[in-house]
Amino acid sequence: MKIEEIRKSLKAIDDLYNSDTSGKFSILYSKLAAIELSSWIEFVMDDIVKNYWKKHSINTQLDKEIKEFIKYNNGFGYEKNFRPMLYKTIGLARVQKIEFLYSIEIDHLKTQLIDLTVDRNKAAHVFHHSGVTATFKAPSYIIGMFEQLHPILGKIKRYVEGIRKLR
């Protein structure tokens, strides 16, 4: 899941944010942190699905379909992006089992991803010199989100990795 790489990246952004005594670049660092975390989450979600499919695939025609589905699935929302990829690869019953076993964590994941999606979209679509007043969460807040989200994604990953191959 490349946890140490994203942790280092977010820490570096936070250090830059904190060292910006002029305040000229703090908004840019805040935007960068939100975009960096959301990119990492999307990578992890795709990786969970790809690794499962690599291990379990027995049909090359479906391989192409799954690769296309992942390729054109842009985003990191639970309901809109991750859940449909899981349905398509591990099946509805297994998704329901994950959601039953980790219901509290999944609810927290959904809430945090909605919050991060708002931040990411604002970061990507608000030009901070345009005169539009916008506030962004500090990189330290984004680091806190990361520290809450990566264990949940790790649980899902371990569950998916533990699914036995069909014979």
Image: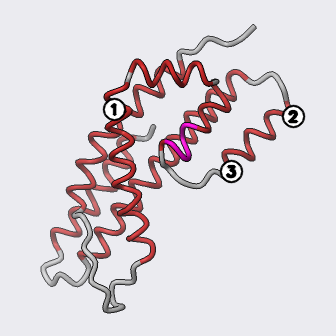
3D distance between C-alphas at marks 2 and 1: 34 Å
Q: Position of residue 39 (x, y in %)?
A: 47, 55
In the depicted view, which residue is nearer to us: 163 or 101? 101
Q: Position of residue 92 (x, y in %)?
A: 61, 24
Q: Quadrant of the C terminus?
A: top right
Above or below, comparing residue 24 to residue 105 in the picture? below
In what element is the residue under mark 1?
helix
Please give left or right for residue 63 compared with residue 25 in the image: right
Q: Which region is colored magenta?
A: 79-83
In the depicted view, which residue is nearer to us: 156 or 15? 156
* Way the structure is coloured: secondary structure
Label placed on residue 100: none
Instruction: Say which residue label 2 marks.
Output: 61
Of the numbered discs 3 and 1, the one sitting upstream in the chain is 3
Q: Within 10 angstroms of label 2, few (less than 14), some, or many (20 or more) residues?
A: few
3D distance between C-alphas at marks 3 and 1: 25 Å
Q: Is residue 82 magenta?
A: yes
**In the image, what residue occupies the spot 15% across and 84% down?**
22
Instruction: Say which residue label 1 marks.
Output: 151
In what element is the residue under mark 3?
helix
* Residue type, label 2: Gln
**In the image, what residue occupies the spot 52% across and 40% down?**
45
Instruction: Say which residue label 3 marks.
Output: 71
Of the numbered discs 2 and 3, the one sitting upstream in the chain is 2
Please give left or right for residue 149 compared with residue 99 in the image: left
3D distance between C-alphas at marks 2 and 3: 16 Å
* Residue type, label 3: Lys
